[in-house]
């Protein structure tokens, strides 16, 4: 009998990059109680070293670090590993800070102060998705680009652009419902595996990232279309 996915997600290796020692130790105790293996890094440089040596299943990354900010850490992690889920902790709630995080490659974020229940829900959702059994190799076309779900990339002739796990999942969902509007709540529930939070702009920001990669003119998209009051639809 195959083990349940929930049990598998409880045995993850999680890297916490946080310079506030009390916060870092509290997060470690919380996640170890949930049966995870947890490693701590107190600055960006050590976080990058551990991310390379540990190959963690998830990274919890603070935005404000002493040597480099979380955006730069995220960008460097993404240049080496496009699939590891990254959850950013931030005391900033302004939309432009959130957008910068998603542009750097963050998968989700939690704004300080946060509840334990909220943080665990986010972590469990990210792990559940990243540890889900791989689907059969799938390729489909959007405009001049081919989406390769096996290699997590966009291809157009000799040109190749990497995609993150959540970018692929959003495109797969929209492709499954092509030419039909899909609500933000549905995208959030299907891709992130949890109920939508009205303050979370993850879906909108991921669509913006994808438009930069797919659309010839981001301001006048031809494929990833906003359906006002509803959500988004894909016109291949």
Image (spheres, grey):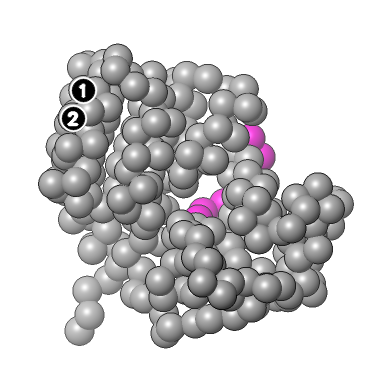
Nearest the eye: 8 or 70: 70
Quarter in which the C terminus is drawn: bottom right
Residue 94: x and y, percent?
Answer: 62, 22
Q: Tell me: 233 left or right of 36.
A: right
Q: Magenta span has 85?
A: no
Q: Please report the residue visible at 53 percent of the width from the left and 20 percent of the height from the top.
A: 92
Q: Which residue is mark 2?
A: 46
Q: Find residue 1 and report its horizontal and vertical position in percent.
A: 20, 84
Residue at 34% from the left image edge and 22% from the top image edge:
68
Cβ–Cβ under 8 Å for marks 1 and 2: yes
Magenta-colored span: 192-199
Q: Which residue is pictured at 20% across the width and 51% down the height?
A: 55
Secondary element under disc 1, as helix, strand or loop, is: loop
Q: Disc 1 designates what residue?
A: 42
Q: Secondary structure at mark 2?
A: helix
Q: Is residue 78 above or below residue 225?
A: above
Residue 170 position, x and y percent, is 58, 62
Cα–Cα span, label 1 and label 2: 7 Å
- Indicate the quadrant where residue 182 lies: bottom right
Disc marking residue 96: none
Q: Residues within 10 Å of mark 2 (few under 14, many from 20)?
A: some
Q: Nearer the viewer, residue 107 or 153?
A: 153
Q: Main secondary structure of the magenta part?
A: loop
Q: Nearer the viewer, residue 178 or 2?
A: 178
Query: Residue at the spot x=50%, y=61% of the render?
Result: 161
């Amino acid at each position: 009998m195959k083990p349940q996915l929930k049990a598998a997600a409880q045995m993850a290796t999680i890297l916490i990059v946080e310079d506030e020692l009390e916060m870092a130790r509290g997060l470690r105790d919380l996640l170890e109680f949930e049966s995870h293996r947890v490693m701590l890094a107190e600055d960006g440089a050590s976080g990058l070293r551990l991310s390379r040596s540990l190959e963690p299943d998830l990274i919890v990354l603070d935005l404000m670090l002493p040597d480099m900010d979380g955006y730069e850490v995220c960008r460097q992690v993404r240049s080496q590993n496009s699939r590891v889920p990254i959850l950013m902790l931030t005391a900033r709630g302004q939309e432009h800070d959130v957008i910068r995080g998603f542009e750097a490659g963050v998968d989700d974020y939690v704004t300080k102060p946060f509840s334990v229940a909220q943080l665990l829900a986010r972590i469990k959702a990210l792990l559940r998705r990243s540890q889900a059994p791989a689907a059969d190799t799938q390729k489909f076309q959007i405009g001049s680009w081919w989406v390769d779900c096996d290699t997590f990339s966009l291809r157009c002739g000799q040109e190749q652009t990497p995609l993150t796990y959540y970018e692929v999942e959003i495109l797969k969902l929209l492709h499954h419902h092509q030419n039909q509007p899909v609500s933000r709540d549905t995208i959030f529930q299907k891709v992130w595996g949890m109920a939508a939070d009205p303050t979370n702009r993850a879906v909108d920001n991921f669509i913006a990232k994808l438009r930069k990669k797919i659309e010839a003119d981001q301001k006048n998209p031809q494929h990833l279309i906003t359906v006002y009051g509803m959500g988004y639809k894909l016109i291949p």
